[in-house]
Amino acid sequence: MNTLSDFEIKQRKYMPVFPKASGKPTPYIPGYPYEDDEPMAATGFHAEQIVTLADQFFRYFEIDEHIFVGIDTFIYYREGDRTKVVAPDIYIVLGASKFPKRRSFYTWSEGTAPSVVFEFLSDSTAHQDRHEKVPLYLLDIGVQEYFIHQPDLERPAECRGWRRGTSGDIVEIAPDAEGGLFSETLNLYFHWKEDAVTEVRLLRPYLPDGTPITTSLEEKALKETAQEERKTAEEQRKAAEERLREEQERRQTAEAELARLRAQLANR
């Protein structure tokens, strides 16, 4: 019988609860540009961080068709004003349909704003990310939570977050003893880890109980390891059965020889 894995059970347990967006998915509105000449990521550090975290989000939220994950695409937040636009590294919209794919995200058409935004610090944008974008995202656009992170190991570690308070004010999210931050909106815990392979300080998501959300490559490696372990276990089982069969045959042979010898002695 097929059963859900432990992670899938936790995934369903911890998935955030939210209302559906009041608008409709809008791939493109004519007159609003959807690309510019800026690169997607400032450096290789940022590219690795964006791709890794986005992959984890795509995998984790794939079970809900009304969670949209955007990567470096334009968000227009005031109808009729093309200057009111931002392009965060990653954003998540709870309540918005995954499909169809959008060229940009239009808050008035979708009937909702991004729920959580992530920006990864670079030398050219760090000041804006730390200061101007905090009230812009949380107050002007209506984002619920905003996080920044420094992925470059050559720069000091920096991981901060803010959320809109119940009275509409801005509240900085207090880190725990390890420097991690909890997102009430996503019901996920975030903490950075220095990756020796990529040499990037990766911000990673965890379930509330500490279970890590793996990347596609990590999941593939885990499955391959599990397959190897099952193969090894099956080989060990067969070897044990063969040893048992051989032992039974030896015992039967010994018992037969003992019976023959007893018969000879009885006939003398």
Image (cartoon, grey):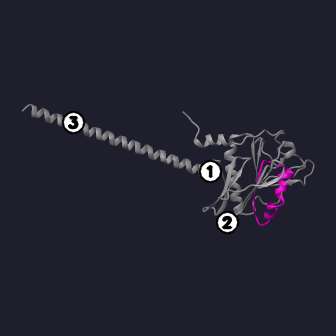
The answer for how far apart the CA atoms under marks 1 and 2 are is 22 Å
SS for callout 3: helix
Residue for badge 3? 255
Residue for badge 2? 153
Q: Nearer the viewer, mark 2 or mark 3?
A: 2
Q: Is residue 202 above or below residue 142?
A: below
Q: Nearer the viewer, mark 1 or mark 3?
A: 1
Closer-to-camera residue (195/98): 195
Give, as a single range, the part of the protein colored magenta.
Answer: 114-142
Q: Residue at x 78, y 60 (%)?
A: 39
Closer-to-camera residue (174/52): 174
Ranked by sequence position, the earlier of labels 2 and 3 is 2
The answer for how far apart the CA atoms under marks 1 and 3 are is 57 Å
Left or right, 63 with reference to 244: right
The amino acid on which the numbered mark 2 sits, given as a three-letter code, is Leu
Residue for badge 1? 212
Q: Is residue 259 above or below residue 85?
A: above
The amino acid on which the numbered mark 1 sits, given as a three-letter code, is Pro
